Image (cartoon, rainbow, N blue to C red):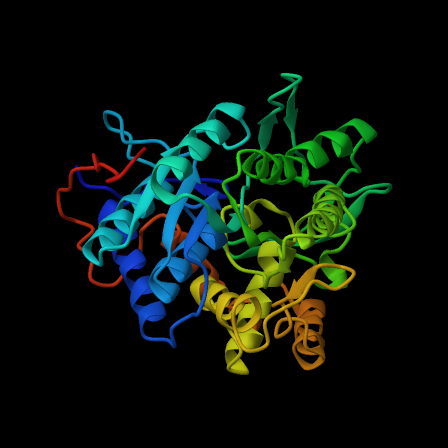
Amino acid sequence: MIIQPKTRGFICTTAHPEGCAKQIEQQIEYVKAQKKIEGPANVLVIGASTGYGLASRISAAFGAGANTIGVFFDKAAEGQRTASAGWYNSAAFEQQAAELGLKSHSIVGDAFSDAIKEKTIALIKAEYGTVDLVIYSVASPRRTHPVTGETFSSVIKPVGTAYSNKTLNFHTGEVSMTTIEPATEEEVRQTIAVMGGEDWRMWIDQLQAADVLADGATTVAYSYIGPEITHPIYRDGTIGQAKHDLEQTAIQMNNLLASKGGRAFVSVNKALVTQSSSAIPVVPLYISALYEVMKEKGLHENCIEQMYRLFSEHLYGEGKATADGSCLIRIDDWEMREDVQTEVMKRWDELTTDNAGELADLEGYRQDFFNLFGFRTDGVDYEADIDPNVDIPNMY
């Protein structure tokens, strides 16, 4: 079949296997061209098929030569429906890892469930012994609690009062005003249950109980803080409440792991185009303006560049991070530089539909969005007939 992008709001309902594979190849080549990471031996990445989780797995495998296990919830192709981008990404990763002789396995299923945790632990015991790095990068709109059976749904809303500001339809370039009504207490509770730290803690507790977490192991989850302009809808909103819970969980787990030389961190990352960030009102316009400013200043990093810097400079570099009272690693430092934020906010005040193409990097945003699904990739013939059915090697 000939696969073209089909969009619905902030998602693309199709993905291109060759485009995804080409982008995985490009990320791998970037990491291989950098200085070797003196890092972990066996790595578990929970949420490994897209975004920061995928980039973490690539950095560990091809930067440090680590063996990796990737856990993710993606779907294979079925009939005229393509597989998800994460499925194609993971298939390409496994193929590339095998060619270099790196041990890797992929587990497909609900990371929130006890069944997938048990399956992962069984694999570690059988093939790896222990893991010394656990990356938690799960982004999901829903979670079913493995003990109570309650299903929670997350929302993207402010807390306390309604919030109005500019937003962007990145497909059309239209800048408009949006107003989001505040969340109820129940919506806040459910968002924390989905996106907070409870499941991360469950993973670490079960890995420890099964004696498959190495002494001195590190675990990292990902978060975002951002500028004040996005705080009402992000940092001070429902997502921010969940991220605060995540950060408190890191402190608790760091205290737990420290007795055996372990560490727990939350890495505060830069704003990037992801499937999750595209869904948040206001944020796409901010990212577009940020991209323009950071590219002008030579500071822009994409996902793989950001994760390589996290691994090489903070987790395993000469300036190896130690967990302070907050357990935060700030690799959003370039984004939050005063000169960058001053210029972004100046542009924000001036942004309209008429000048958005000049003051913000709309094309860069669109390019990154379609790249998420394997489209607009150099060297790929999108008019060619292609089989959407791709197997993931080493799927456990």
Quadrant containing the C terminus is top left
Residue at image coords 57%, 50%:
277
Say left or right for 90 vs 206.
Answer: left
Residue in front for this viewpoint, 372 or 44 = 44
Residue 331 placement (x, y as % from top left): 61, 68
Q: Is residue 49 left or right of residue 193?
A: left
Q: Is residue 5 visible?
A: no
- Tell me which residue sits at (31%, 58%) in the image: 23
Q: Is residue 260 above or below residue 79?
A: below
Q: Residue at the location (74% across, 44% down)?
A: 245
Q: Is residue 151 visible?
A: yes
In the displayed orientation, state which residue is furthest to the left: 385
Residue at image point 57% right, 72% down: 359
Q: Please tell me in which quadrant of the rendered image residue 99 appears.
A: bottom left
Q: Residue 303, position in %: x, y?
A: 47, 62
Measured along the vertical axis of the image, is residue 203 above or below residue 56?
above
For residue 122, above or below residue 89: above
189 horizontally vs 16: left or right = right
Q: Residue furthest right?
A: 160
> Residue 375 or 201: which is nearer the viewer?
201
Quadrant in which the N terminus appears: top left
Q: Nearer the viewer, residue 3 or 237?
A: 237
Q: Looking at the image, how many numbered discs can be counted on the residues?
A: 0
Question: Seen from this angle, which residue lies furthest top?
Answer: 149
Q: Position of residue 358 (x, y in %)?
A: 53, 73
Q: Is residue 325 left or right of residue 130?
A: right
Instruction: Tell me where residue 236 appears, x and y as whole percent.
Output: 79, 50
